[in-house]
Amino acid sequence: TQLLEQSPQFLSIQEGENLTVYCNSSSVFSSLQWYRQEPGEGPVLLVTVVTGGEVKKLKRLTFQFGDARKDSSLHITAAQPGDTGLYLCAGSNNNAGNMLTFGGGTRLMVKP
Amino acid sequence: DTGVSQDPRHKITKRGQNVTFRCDPISEHNRLYWYRQTLGQGPEFLTYFQNEAQLEKSRLLSDRFSAERPKGSFSTLEIQRTEQGDSAMYLCASSLFMNTGELFFGEGSRLTVL
């Protein structure tokens, strides 16, 4: 069974601060996605990374896929209250029907 | 709106009753997935279809759970003899067969079993 562990589980910060969320596994994934989920809604895809060492930027969000494709990080610069939500990483393995294995999530609260 | 839609959004039922959820995927997507999410946790995989064929089922899916996708379009997830432990958000997602594995989720169906 492939497992993804996210840390921290909870994060409460002030507007304007920077933060990093980590997603780690002992397994190799063919690709990794980051999703953001708001209460009562389904997860919404933010980014997909597929190449070891890949870095993608989405405005104030920077995503990195580890060289060995076992881990990933999400860095948010100058967090805003609108960034509040549950951030989920999810790994995909081509040999498993592209089913996603999700981490437990990081719940982020950004206070104004 | 051409996204994934789920119905109902909320269902409250008494223990022992049967419930059915429906999912309409994005029309050109041939893969459809069901996930379950409990409060404060990430989604857990239940089952997936490629067209009308159910190709994988999680061990989480007890024999009280059954899913169908009869014509390769919409899907239903039925839970028989519901238990309080079935209370969760049931999420449906769809995708095209592609290497990057990106899923597009619906808004979910929240089940509360009293």
Image (spheres, grey):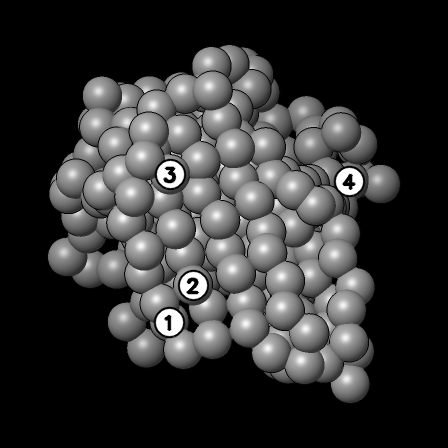
Indicate whether A35 appears above or below B32. below
Residue A111: percent from left, percent from top: 79, 78
Residue sitting at 32 percent across and 35 percent down?
A67
Indicate whether B49 appears above or below B101. above
- Asked if the residue at tag 1 contacts the one at tag 3, i.e. Cβ–Cβ closer than 8 Å, the answer is no
Left or right of B25 on screen, residue B46: right
Q: Which mark is residue A62?
A: 2
Gap in angstroms between the C-alphas marked 2 and 3: 13 Å
Q: Which mark is residue B107?
A: none
Say what secondary structure mark 4 lies in.
Answer: strand
Q: Quadrant of residue B54?
A: top left
Whether discs 3 and 1 lie on one chain: the answer is yes
Amino acid type, label 1: Leu
- Asked if the residue at tag 4 contacts the one at tag 1, i.e. Cβ–Cβ closer than 8 Å, the answer is no
Question: Which subunit holds the residue at mark 3?
Answer: A
The residue lying toward the viewer, choosing from A110 and A76, is: A76
What residue does disc 4 label? B113
Question: Which subunit holds the residue at mark 4?
Answer: B
Residue sitting at 49 percent across and 26 percent down?
A25
Gap in angstroms between the C-alphas marked 1 and 4: 40 Å
Residue A27: percent from left, percent from top: 41, 20
Crowd band around label 1 with a 10 angstrom C-alpha radius: few (<14), some (14–19), many (20+): few
Amino acid type, label 2: Thr
Residue sitting at 26 percent across and 32 percent down?
A30
**Image quadrant containing the C terminus of chain A:** bottom right
Q: Which mark is residue A66?
A: 3
Mark nearer the viewer, 4 or 2: 2
Residue A110: percent from left, percent from top: 73, 73
What residue does disc 1 label? A58
